[in-house]
Amino acid sequence: MKLISFSHLQIFAIAALVAVACSAPAPDSPPAYGAPPPSYKEPGMPFDFAYAVKDDSTGNDFAHDESSDGQVTSGSYRVALPDGRTQIVTFTADHDNGYVAEVAYEGEASYPPAPVYA
């Protein structure tokens, strides 16, 4: 009977091959890559809020109101623009349609006269 002798390097190589073979996923298991599983959507909570600021000394004039029934959020916000107009955004948002906004302007834009250079 002849004994087979292995060097340390050969034993390490065999152990490494066995470790790699044992760590491979089974053929019937799902792959570890790909799209993530669908996320769970938390149910919405109804809410309602509003605020407004109008400060004549600084020219600040803006407001925001918003409400939700837990499914659809809707509201509007407005801001005084430097050109004298007021921008008004009215919106709705839900999981099916996303954020949908309508933008409107009130007033006429006016600009200061151009400076005269000598």
Image: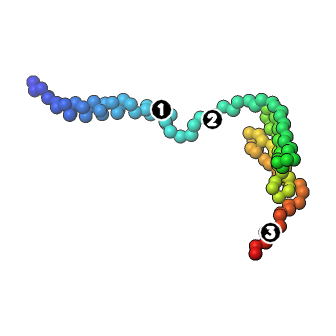
Q: Which residue is mark 3?
A: 114
How far is disc 2 from disc 1 in space, using C-alphas?
21 Å
How far is disc 3 from disc 1 in space, using C-alphas?
75 Å
Residues packed near mark 2 inside 10 Å, few (<14), some (14 to 19) or many (20 plus): few
| Front position among marks 3 and 2 | 3
Q: Position of residue 91 (x, y in %)?
A: 81, 45
Q: Which residue is mark 2?
A: 38
Q: Residue furthest right?
A: 107
Q: Which mark is residue 28?
A: 1
Residue at 80% from the left image edge and 68% from the top image edge: 114
How far is disc 3 from disc 2 in space, using C-alphas?
58 Å
Residue at 43% from the left image edge and 32% from the top image edge: 25
Q: Position of residue 7 (x, y in %)?
A: 16, 31
Q: Residue furthest bottom?
A: 118
Of 71 and 57, the residue lying toward us: 57
Q: Position of residue 6 (x, y in %)?
A: 16, 30
Q: Is residue 90 visible?
A: no
Quarter of the image for the N terminus: give it. top left
User: Which label's residue is closer to the chain start, 3 or 1?
Assistant: 1
